[in-house]
């Protein structure tokens, strides 16, 4: 089939969950013999030098990009607030992108138009005017639930109030957008069940994130006291969770086990974090090779308290045989066995005790890593998962053809 893939970021370099969540499926669709045309926003937040993208990827996807300044603008935020519109969405509503999309749709026809997330929904009306192809949204998250979680965790009254308003506006928009599509793909059964129970009348399918496990070769690490965190720190749930961990857990861990070391990597690390002084902690900022970084240490920490969908970095860590310690929110959507495949902790005391217990039991750390890798190989193989995606697309295409 011929697929038009619309993206709110250029999925390169493949260092973060958002880029991986797009590019892994794109590559597998191409390998399976389908045609993919990609039209991506090149945003100021995640700007990519197009010349840095491999020619093979640009050619195989007929990649076109449109520059978009989506930096937060207080004046525009105030205007949308007064209008009662979602500022989250308006930052991705671009006339230049709409014009380029119109050119593409007038030039070519497609079997499926794939929206990579909610932030492409502003273009549904234009697509309907120019194409008869089914529109399917791959919803890696229920976006408004992420913001609800951020609002619940926020302690500053004014910021909490504003986050609650953003959540309400985004929820109203998202509930309309999912019903404007011909199909919705969720990464987790939790999100699928939520959509079905909350007024979504569009056909929904669970197609989890998949990885090519052959790319993830575990390296043996004999130091059970080496811990790490990796995640984009311009994504608020990651930053919020990491700051919570450093402020409430780490000093106690290091005091009880001075030889413990924590290694933190992440794109767009704030200066206040990079320049902070926590004993036993090394801050790396953005790193070139996430797999190489994760393979150096034994225990992966994912302190997350807001979000929906699936945490792709956890899947990657499990594929590399790393022991994972995360929260109930972090493991949400990953239907593995708790305390067999991963460890879960939600309070400072639970996190502290779990980390110390793992550090004192290196055989447990190795067993968690082995179990996690087996779980990922059995449940997240990209080839099998892509077949499910294509099957859902074929159903949508048949549903659009008049009887």
Image (cartoon, grey):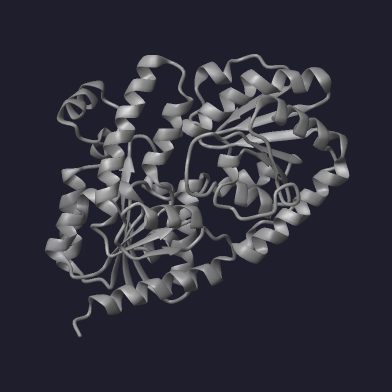
Horizontal and vertical percent position of residue 7: 34, 52
248 or 101: which is nearer to us? Answer: 248
73 or 204: which is nearer to us? Answer: 204
- What's the residue at 81%, 51% (across, down)? 367
- What's the residue at 63%, 33% (across, down)? 346
- What's the residue at 44%, 30% (across, down)? 150
- What's the residue at 54%, 52% (across, down)? 333
Say above or below: 124 vs 233: below
Any part of residue 188 in sight: no
| Image-based side of 287 in relation to 75, left or right | right
| Image-based side of 342 in relation to 285, left or right | right
Q: Residue furthest front?
A: 197
Count numbered badges in the picture: 0
Q: Quadrant of the N terminus?
A: bottom left
Horizontal and vertical percent position of residue 82: 17, 25
Say above or below: 34 vs 358: below
Q: Quadrant of the C terminus?
A: bottom left
Q: Residue furthest left?
A: 129
Horizontal and vertical percent position of residue 185: 40, 60
Horizontal and vertical percent position of residue 165: 30, 28
| Image-based side of 22 in relation to 256, left or right | left
Quadrant for residue 169, please give it: top left
Any part of residue 256 in sight: yes
Quadrant for residue 299, please give it: top right
């Amino acid at each position: 089939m011929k697929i038009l893939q619309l993206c709110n970021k250029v999925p390169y370099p493949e260092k973060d969950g958002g880029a991986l969540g797009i590019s892994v499926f794109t590559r597998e669709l191409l390998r399976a013999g389908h045609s993919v045309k990609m039209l991506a926003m090149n945003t100021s937040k995640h700007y990519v030098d197009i010349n840095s993208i491999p020619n093979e990827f640009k050619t195989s996807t007929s990649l076109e990009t449109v520059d978009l300044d989506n930096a937060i603008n207080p004046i525009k935020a105030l205007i949308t607030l007064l209008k009662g519109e979602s500022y989250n969405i308006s930052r991705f509503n671009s006339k230049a992108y709409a014009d380029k999309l119109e050119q593409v749709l007038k030039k070519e026809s497609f079997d499926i138009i794939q929206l990579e997330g909610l932030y492409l929904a502003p273009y549904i009306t234009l697509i309907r005017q120019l194409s008869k192809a089914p529109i399917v949204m791959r919803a890696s998250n229920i976006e408004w639930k992420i913001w609800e979680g951020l609002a619940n965790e926020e302690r500053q009254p004014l910021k909490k109030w504003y986050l609650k308003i953003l959540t309400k506006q985004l929820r109203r928009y998202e509930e309309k957008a999912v019903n404007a599509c011909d199909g919705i793909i969720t990464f987790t059964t939790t999100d699928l069940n939520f959509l079905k129970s909350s007024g979504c009348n569009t056909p929904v399918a669970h197609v989890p994130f998949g990885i090519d496990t052959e790319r993830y070769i575990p390296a043996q690490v004999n130091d059970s006291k080496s811990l790490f965190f990796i995640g984009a720190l311009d994504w608020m749930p990651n930053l919020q969770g990491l700051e919570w961990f450093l402020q409430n857990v780490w000093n106690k861990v290091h005091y009880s086990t001075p030889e413990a070391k924590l290694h933190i990597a992440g794109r767009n690390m704030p200066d206040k974090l990079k320049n902070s002084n926590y004993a036993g902690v090394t801050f790396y900022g953005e790193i070139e090779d996430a797999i190489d970084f994760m393979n150096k240490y034994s225990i992966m920490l994912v302190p997350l308290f807001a979000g929906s969908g699936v945490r792709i970095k956890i899947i990657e860590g499990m594929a590399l045989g790393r022991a994972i310690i995360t929260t109930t929110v972090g493991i949400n959507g990953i239907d593995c066995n708790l305390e067999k495949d991963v460890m879960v902790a939600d309070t400072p005391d639970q996190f502290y005790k779990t980390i110390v217990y793992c550090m004192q039991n290196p055989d447990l750390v190795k067993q968690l890593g082995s179990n996690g890798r087996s779980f990922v190989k059995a449940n997240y193989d990209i080839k099998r998962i892509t077949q499910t995606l294509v099957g859902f697309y074929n159903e949508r295409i048949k549903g659009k053809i008049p009887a």
